[in-house]
Image: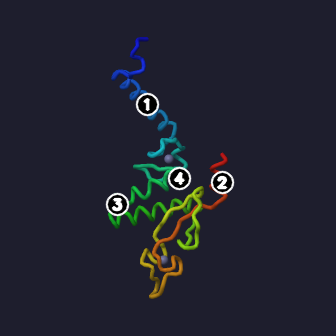
Amino acid sequence: MSGNSNELSSERLQWLEKQLQLIKHALARLGLKACSQCGTFFPASDTGALFGSREPVCLDCVQQWWPRRSELLNGRERDVAERRLVTWLMHHHGCTTVKLQEHPMDAQRFHMIASCQRCDRAGICAGSRCGSCDGKGTVWLVAPEQRIRHLHSS
Ligand SMILES: [Zn+2]
Ligand SMILES: [Zn+2]
């Protein structure tokens, strides 16, 4: 090898990119899909592993990804996307909602702010203060503790 071996030539880079594409296609054929944020592969058949299809995101990345993503959406799109995300988190990861002021948030545990589903962010339900969010309009969505511990130990 020459003295330039620490520099990647453009042919070498092109070759590497092609190899990467081939590997990605092979993995997709094997039924694996990557998280768009961290690149980790998951079985595409496991609907709880990745959220969304155009920009799939794994549970570990959702918490960081959602605030950035939601800023790019307009009000209605955001509501629809948030509802889908909340449903996915509750259905596949056993997440539950907790009033904002009731919870000292633990960084180890998955949590994000979501619209209160009972009052639809209004804070008012049937003419009086919404009991699910205490009139705040938003709640914490949190993962069950034992689930997170299990994820970290495996
Ligand atoms: Zn990820
Ligand atoms: Zn409410």
Residue at screen point 46% across, 78% down:
119
Residue at screen point 43% across, 11% down:
1
Q: Secondary structure at mark 2?
A: helix
Residue at screen point 51% across, 40% down:
31
> Residue under circle 2?
149
> Residue under circle 1?
20
User: Mark 4–mark 1 contact, CB under 8 Å?
Assistant: no
Q: Dot 4: within a 10 Å radius of its alpha carbon, few (fewer than 14), some, or many (20 or more) residues?
A: some
Q: Amino acid at mark 4?
A: Leu
Mark 2 or 4, closer to the camera:
2
> Residue under circle 4?
59
Residue at screen point 42% across, 58% down:
67
Q: Is 56 situated above or below 88? A: above
Structural distance between the alpha carbons of marks 2 and 4: 14 Å
Mark 1 or 2, closer to the camera:
2
Between discs 1 and 3, the one toward the N terminus: 1
> Residue under circle 3?
73
The C terminus is located in which quarter?
top right
